[in-house]
Image (cartoon, helix red, strand yellow):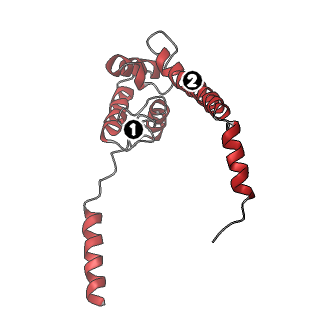
Amino acid sequence: MFKNLFIALLVCTSLMAQAKVAPNISSDPALEARMMVIAEELRCLVCQNETIAASHADLAVDLKNQIRIKLTEGQSQKQILNFMVERYGDFVLYRPPLKTTTVLLWLGPFTLLAIAAVMLVLNVRRRRRSAQSEALSEADSAKAQAMLAEPAQL
């Protein structure tokens, strides 16, 4: 019993030793707050449904470090966002501007939802028509009535 517990403890300890170290955080809390505001505006290119502020992907950590460097160089939030857009395109913005190149990002989900709704309506109508057209003929109806009238045999 104690031997198994000791082995489990060793395994857990070795796994904890392999854990990643937290990324370096600036000693200046004001700089860190400004970095987080900008990071909330940028999409993680790995996760794609998170901001880089919330992501722990290696690329997100690198982008946060890049923002810190640019802030220490004296660049403004707008300059940093423009740099990221130039480098990665409008998709890097968590809320990209509505323009011809990003219209698919904005209208794509609604278009897919509308197509799915139309297909659902058409499918329901087709099934209703096929159910109505498969009505029993007079002969089949009489045969069914005769079978129901007969006593059940076991």
- Please state, as top left, top right, bottom left or bottom right, where the C terminus lies in the image: bottom right
Local packing at callout 2 (Cα closer than 10 Å; few below 14, some 14-19, many 20+) is few
Give x and y (percent) for residue 124: 63, 31
> In which image quadrant can residue 20 be found?
bottom left
Give x and y (percent) for residue 48: 41, 34
Q: Which mark is residue 7?
A: none
Local packing at callout 1 (Cα closer than 10 Å; few below 14, some 14-19, many 20+) is some
Alpha-carbon distance for marks 2 and 1? 22 Å
Disc 2 on helix, strand or loop?
A: helix
Instruction: Looking at the picture, tell me which residue is in the foreground, 20 or 46.
Output: 46
In front: mark 2 or mark 1?
A: 2
Disc 1 on helix, strand or loop?
A: loop
The kind of residue on which mark 2 rests is Phe
> In which image quadrant can residue 115 be found?
top right
- Total marks in image: 2
The kind of residue on which mark 1 rests is Cys
Give x and y (percent) for residue 133: 65, 30
Task: Decide: is 1 above or below 72.
Answer: below
Task: Decide: is 40 above or below 114.
Answer: below
Q: Residue furthest top?
A: 100
Q: Name the residue located 29 percent from the left edge and 89 percent from the top edge.
A: 2
Q: Earlier in the sequence, mark 2 or mark 1?
A: 1
The residue to which callout 2 is attached is 110
The residue to which callout 1 is attached is 47
Could you tell whether 61 is left or right of 114 in the image?
left
Q: Name the residue located 72 percent from the left edge and 60 percent from the top edge.
A: 150
Q: Name the residue located 46 percent from the left edge and 23 percent from the top edge.
A: 77
Task: Decide: is 6 above or below 12.
Answer: below
Instruction: Looking at the picture, tell me which residue is in the foreground, 44 or 77.
Output: 44
Give x and y (percent) for residue 97: 51, 16
